[in-house]
Amino acid sequence: MMTTDPKDTGFRIKGWHVLAGFVGAFGIIISVNIALAVNAVRTFPGLESDNSYLASQTFDTRRDAQLALGWEVAARLQDGRVVLTINDAKGYPVRVTSLETTLGRPTNVVDDISPAFDWDGTAYVADADLAPGNWDLWIKARAENGTVFEQRLEMTMGR
């Protein structure tokens, strides 16, 4: 006499079940990797220099000239404004002959702006309505003697 197991449903894993599981699992992994790679490339801010080799040829000279200025540069967020201070080696405020700035997020260029800084006698001040998080201020200033000063300053807007 033959008895059947009540737990036996008749379902058996066959080769095509295993194949479908592998194809589905690897399909998900590959899809996620492609999506992450596309987003990484799409949000990359780009190159800092058109030709890094040529820029490197004058780097030491430019750096030495910039260091010879003895400037201390700082940026802070205060009451909806960005305050940029440039002080000489003796601690006196410096007024530059030209100032170019870009304020943006460290990771992408979507929120980049070029704030209009005004000299208030001791610092450069610009209005900036910034969302919470990390911000970078890239500055390019020219001293009275013609020396170009370039620096990136990090700031954090409270949450």
Image (cartoon, rainbow, N blue to C red):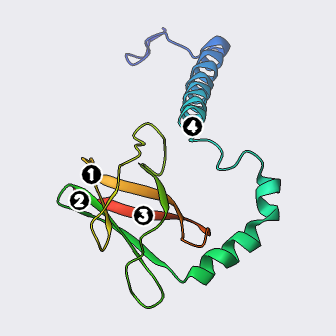
**Picture residue at 36% right of the left edge, 48% below the top:** 115
Mark 2 highlights which residue? 158
Q: Is residue 25 above or below residue 80?
A: above
The residues tagged by marks 4 and 3 sit, at their Cα atoms, a distance apart of 22 Å
| Amino acid type at mark 2 | Gly
Front label number (2 vs 3)? 3
Looking at the rendered structure, the kind of residue marked 4 is: Ala
Position of 114 relative to 7 (above/below) = below
Spatial CA distance of label 4 from label 2 is: 26 Å
Residue under numbered circle 1: 132
> Looking at the image, which residue is at 61% across and 80% down?
67
Of pointers 1 and 4, the one earlier in the residue sequence: 4
Residues at marks 1 and 2 touching, judged by CB atoms closer than 8 Å: yes
The answer to which image quadrant residue 22 occupies is: top right
Viewer-side residue, 98 vs 85? 98
Which element type, helix, strand or loop, lies under badge 2? loop
Q: Residues within 10 Å of mark 4 (few under 14, many from 20)?
A: few
Counting residues from the start of the chain, the first of labels 1 and 2 encountered is: 1
* Label at residue 17: none
Residue of label 3: 154
How would you rate the neighbour count of disc 2 (Cα within 10 Å): few for under 14, some for 14-19, many for 20 or more?
A: few
* Residue lying at the far bottom of the rendered structure: 90
Which residue is at a point 43% across and 57% down the rendered structure image?
137
Label 3 residue SS: strand
Earlier residue among tags 4 and 2: 4
**Residue 16 coordinates in the image, percent (x, y):** 65, 12
Helix, strand or loop at label 4? It is: helix
Q: Is residue 130 left or right of residue 151?
A: left
Q: Nearer the viewer, mark 4 or mark 3?
A: 3
Per the rendering, the mark at residue 40 is 4
